[in-house]
Structures are given as structure tokens and as C-alpha cells.
Image (cartoon, rainbow, N blue to C red):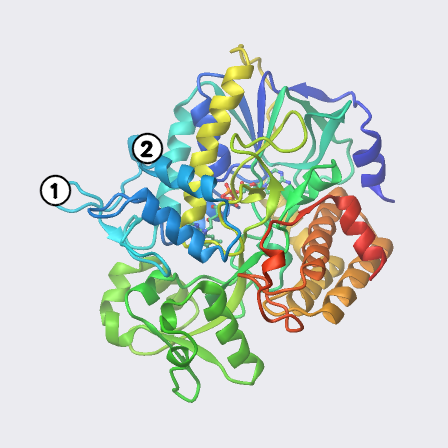
Amino acid sequence: MALIRELGETMTIFDNTLDADGALIVGAGLAGLFTALKLAPRPVTVLSPKPLGMGASSAWAQGGVAAAIGQGDSPRAHAHDTEMAGAGIVDHGTAEGVTAEAVARIEDLARWGTPFDRDDFGNFELGREAAHSANRIVKVEGDRAGWAIMQAIIAEVRRTPSIRVVEGITALSLARDNGRIVGVYCRRLGDRYSEPIYIRARATILAAGGLGGLYAVTTNPPGVRGHAMGMAARAGAIIADPEFVQFHPTAIATGADPAPLATEALRGEGAILLNDLGERFMPAIHPDAELAPRDIVARANFRQIQSGRRVFLDTREVLGADILTRFPTVSKYCHDAGIDPVNGVIPVTPAAHFHMGGVKVDERGRSSLPGLWVCGEASCTGLHGANRLASNSLLEAVVYGARIAVDIGGLEPARELTPFKGIEWDDAEGNKAEEVLRNTIAVQELRRIMSDLVGVERDAEGLKTALRQIAHLEATAEQVTSAYLNMTTSATLVAAAALKRTESRGGHFRLDYPEPNENWELHTEMTLGEALAIRAGA
Ligand SMILES: Cc1cc2nc3c(=O)[nH]c(=O)nc-3n(C[C@H](O)[C@H](O)[C@H](O)COP(=O)(O)OP(=O)(O)OC[C@H]3O[C@@H](n4cnc5c(N)ncnc54)[C@H](O)[C@@H]3O)c2cc1C
């Protein structure tokens, strides 16, 4: 039983120890791969559970990357919008710094081959998304930014000799030595029986994504389930703002898991929300109607659905048949589900989409644990506050990826990569393993608890019930594997922090405390110990 209790806590050095020869990056989304490229020519090993490009939210991004690049726009205006969306707890310095570095990082992505949409003069064609005061979303073919950026970056990674990619491997626990993170314990995806591999590293960069998949209804890929935050918390890292989960208002309601996304850019184009009585309900709720902040639109949709209505996105008048060419990804999702967006409306539902919280890092991407840097959605930099401004997350990933590379580059001497026994990706085995992990009753139960009790609307009673049920799951699950414990750990942190924050702000809405409280205009900082104490008292 309880493999993790042997693994996570005692950290025996196993025979099958490998040396990363320098930096080790856990996760191969935009955060991980961009950091690897920025570290070149310093050697780096990147771990990816799936073949590169698969299993990462980054490749599914539809809108694009926010950058104050257009005429009349400025980083200051972008920072201001970021702070307004973040509902009072965005770090001012972080917002100013990230938005100021945006253009340089977009240039990196373009230099590495991202075919951003441009006009006849070569200027970026910029999209608009909710709560941005200017057109500032750098995009590709309308809604294919994530896919195109990842294709370009992956090609560049493959061309870079200092980057060693190990596919088909998943990290279970961080390895500690005298309080310092010295690498990770990992396993071939799905191989639960052989001894874990210890990969030793002088610098470990956790870039294993967010936690949307902890919820039953999510837009995130199946493997993105809070593993990064769970691993770091179990190793003792300080976690910031875990209660702030962003629910996207318009996942396409096809019953598919994960739920495909209908990008906010559609509402940016003027698409409207209707209920099944044909009523447009957003104008009565917020002056910006469908372009109100995401949490407000998500709650409005949630309440319609709770009251027995269905909700639809109507693009017919503003886009007509243009949706097919201007939003090919959304059109394909609709087509696959038998929905005709040209002549009909698109059924939508709120879905867990993005985690504003994560492992607390400083401006260099350093966590509270020496030897551990965290990048991308796994981290909490303070940029998003209580609510992320659309398209700021890919930006955050590249800005911090570059900063982390500079920081590690200053500490780490260049060295040669030695041959490393590769792990062959076996598609059938890997997919089967993921399917098993996805569908165990304990995992399904955990996801149900999160959606029902720690979701769009929360209250003390529900959160306490959730914490008790998560504890029960941990105590009774047939196999408490490290992967499962990473998930329950993240779930515990979200629910405990949500219970502690007795107010509503941004993505965190408490029915029993529906207003913001100025005493809570601050970040949550929590260790796993504190979260477990809250859970024990629930
Ligand atoms: C449908 C969708 C649309 C979006 N649209 C936009 C947008 O337009 N603009 C924007 O800015 N943001 C958007 N976002 C958010 C954005 O895509 C993510 O926040 C961002 O891509 C996160 O990048 P990342 O590299 O941190 O994580 P990911 O891209 O999720 O990558 C995580 C990596 O870690 C790996 N991993 C997970 N667990 C482990 C483990 N245990 N061991 C090893 N590796 C592991 C995964 O396989 C993956 O390779 C969108 C998100 C979704 C889901």
C-alpha cells in the first residue's frame, strides 16, 4: 500500500539514479520548453509524460498572448487592466515588469518561428478580449495561437543540442536533501510497479501546469490535475492564492471530458449569450454585458444552469459563416459534436480553466525551497491576483521562463550532456495508463467533490464537507499512489484556502460572504501543514 509514504517522505536513493547534468525541467508546455530554449547552450533535461506537444494546456490556447504592441497602447495600460481584472490583489511591480517585457518575449517567439497574424505591412494583427482596454492579443490564424506557438517551439527544441527531452515519464515527488531540492522521483507513465527513477539535478524547474483537471468539468488536458502544486506542497513549499480558480464561462457543453473551449474572442467579436428562452441576460448583470470580467460571466451562466435553464453562445449575427474560417478550432469542435454554429447556437457551460494560485515564487521564479524554480501555471507570481486577465498566462510563462534561465545561468556552469538512457514512449501503454488514472473511482469522486463543493460558488458548509470527503478518500483509496496524493494535496489546498478566505473576490465567490472585504485585500500564503490543520478541523 501507500507507495508515496515510502517515496515522498524517506527519499531513499535508488539504484536507478540518473544525472540531469545541470538543470531539470518537469513539464513540457510553453513554460518548460521556453525555459529550456532560454537556457541554451547550458544543458537541460526536460521531462514530458507524453510526446512533446501532447498533454499541455499551452497547445490548446486559442486566444493568444497579450502584449502592448499596438499603436497608442502601452505596458502601463496593460498593467492597469491586469490590476483591474485581478480585483485588488495583483502585485503592482509584477504587473509592470511582466507587461514591459512582453514585446521582447513576443519577438523571441516570432524569431523561433511562430507565424503570428500580420497585416500587409508586417504589423501584428491584434485581437481584443474581455477587460482589455486595447486590441493587444497577438494571435495565429484566429484561434490557433497555442498550437502554432508550440509547433514552432518544439521544432526549435528538437534543433537545440543542449536540450535532452525524455518523453513518457511522469514526476511523482520532489527529492530533498537537507532542505534543498535535488531533483525528482519519476516513473514511466503507467508503470506503477517498478522502482521509481531518481533524476538528480542541481536546479529543478517545475513547469507541470495548473489544476483544472481536478474538476469534473474542465477545459484542461487530462494530465493537468494539480500534480505540480501537490508535489511542491508535499516537499514543503509555500503555496500562494490556491483558492483562486478561474472558471471559463463558455466551454462547449457537449458532455465531452475535457470540455472543448469556445474562446472569449468570440464575445470580443460581439457574440452574445442567450438562455433557452431566447433571453439575453448579461446586459442586466453588468454594463459590459458579455465582455464583463470572466468570473461575472461564469457566475451568470452558472446561475442560469442552476435554475434549470440552458445557456447558448450566439455568433450567427456577428460572424455568420465567417466563424468557419476565422475560428477554425471552435468550428471543428462544433462540427465534431454535431453543432452548426453558422445557423444555430452553441451550448455552453462554465468549466475550470485556469489557476491563478500556485507555488509562490519571487521575481526570479524562485520558490521558497532552495534549488526549486517554478514557471507557468504551476507558479503564483502575483500577476493574476484573484482573476486572470485573458491571454496573460502564456505571457507570464515566457517572461518567467526567460527570467529563470538568466537566474540559473548565473549560478550554473555550462557542462557537457552525457548519454542518458531514454525512455521510449509507448502510445498504447501510455494512453491506457492515463485512462486508468483518469477513470479510477477515487479520481472521479475527487473531481465531483471539487466541482460540486469547491466550484463557481462556495460556502463554509460545502467547503468543510469537501475537506472531510477528500480526507476520507485519501484514507480509504485502494491505492494511494504519489500521483493521487499530489491531486488530493492540491484539492485540499484549494478548499482549505477557500474556507479561510471569508469574502468574495475575483474567481473566489462565497455565497455566505458575497462581498469583498478590504481586510482580505492580500495574498493567501499557505503550507500543506496549515491546509491539513484546516482540514482536520472541518
Ligand atoms: C483550452 C485553453 C485555452 C487557453 N487559451 C489561452 C490563451 O489564449 N491565452 C493564454 O495566455 N492562456 C490561455 N490558456 C491558459 C494557458 O494555456 C496555460 O495557462 C498555459 O499554457 C500554461 O502553460 P504551462 O507550460 O505552465 O502548462 P501546460 O502547458 O499545461 O504544460 C504542463 C506540462 O507539464 C506536464 N506534466 C503534468 N504533470 C506532470 C508530471 N507529474 N510530471 C511531468 N510532467 C508533467 C504536462 O504533460 C505538460 O507537458 C488556455 C488554457 C486552455 C486549457
Q: CA distance from mark 2 to mark 1?
A: 20 Å
Residue 122 quadrant: top left
Amino acid type at mark 2: Ala
Q: In this orientation, which residue lies closer to the viewer: 45 or 226? A: 226
Q: In this orientation, which residue lies closer to the viewer: 260 or 373? A: 373
Q: In this orientation, which residue lies closer to the viewer: 209 or 434? A: 209
Residue 339 quadrant: bottom left
Disc 1 packing (10 Å; few <14; some 14–19; many ≥20): few
Residue labelled with disc 1 = 121
Work out which quarter of the rendered image holds the C terminus and state it: bottom right
Amino acid type at mark 1: Phe
Secondary structure state at the residue bearing disc 1: loop
Tell which circle, 2 or 1, labels the residue nearer the N-terminal end.
2
Q: Is residue 359 in sight in this rendering?
A: yes
Closer mark to the observer between disc 2 and disc 1: 2
Q: Is residue 466 left or right of residue 39?
A: right
Q: Is residue 371 left or right of residue 63?
A: right
Secondary structure state at the residue bearing disc 2: helix
Query: What is the x, y in percent for residue 35?
Result: 47, 30
Q: Is mark 1 within 8 Å of ligand 1?
A: no
Q: Give the residue displayed 29% in from the left and 50% down from the top.
A: 136
Residue labelled with disc 2 = 104
Residue 537 quadrant: bottom right
Do the numbered discs 2 and 1 sit on residues whose CB atoms are within 8 Å? no
Query: What is the x, y in percent for residue 38?
Result: 43, 25
Query: What is the x, y in percent for residue 180?
Result: 71, 24
Q: Is residue 52 in sight in this rendering?
A: no
